[in-house]
Image (tube, rainbow, N blue to C red):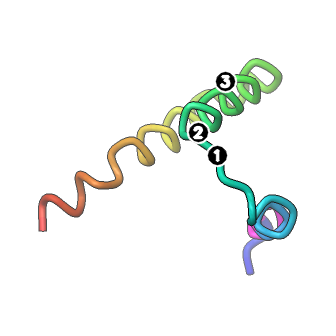
């Protein structure tokens, strides 16, 4: 298990039963970057990856 998996596991345990919209996720990512501007690039990459995730399936 990677160190970062701990946060992912906590997220799944604490909020795994919740339903959220992508708009809600986008707002939380904006809030996070506002509080932690040093993470702007990785969050942008992650958001772009999420936005284009289905594109990979279309190429197959």
**Pick the front one: 53 or 17:** 17
**Residue under label 1:** 20
Q: In the displayed structure, does residue 28 sit left or right of residue 57?
A: right
Q: Which span is picked out in magenta?
A: 4-8
Does residue 43 belong to the magenta stretch?
Answer: no
**Pick the front one: 44 or 22:** 22
**Residue under label 2:** 42
Q: Residue at x 59, y 36 (%)?
A: 43
Tell me residue 2's x, y (percent). 73, 74
Label 2's element?
Answer: helix
Tell me residue 25's x, y (percent). 63, 38
**Pick the front one: 45 or 32:** 32
Q: Which of marks 3 and 1 is in front?
A: 1
**Residue under label 3:** 30
Examine the rendered structure and indicate whether residue 57 appears above or below residue 37.
below
Classed neighbour count for the residue bearing mark 1: other residues with Cα under 10 Å, few (<14), some (14–19), many (≥20): few
Tell me residue 12's x, y (percent). 76, 67
Rendered image quadrant of residue 16: bottom right
Q: Which of marks 1 and 2 is nearer the N terminus?
A: 1
Q: Residue at x 66, y 32 (%)?
A: 29
Label 1's element?
Answer: loop
């Amino acid at each position: 298990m990677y160190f970062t998996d701990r946060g992912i596991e906590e997220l799944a345990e604490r909020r795994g039963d919740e339903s959220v919209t992508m708009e809600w996720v986008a707002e939380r990512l904006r809030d996070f970057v506002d509080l932690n501007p040093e993470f702007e690039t990785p969050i942008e990459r992650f958001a772009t990856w999420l936005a284009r995730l289905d594109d990979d399936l279309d190429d197959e």
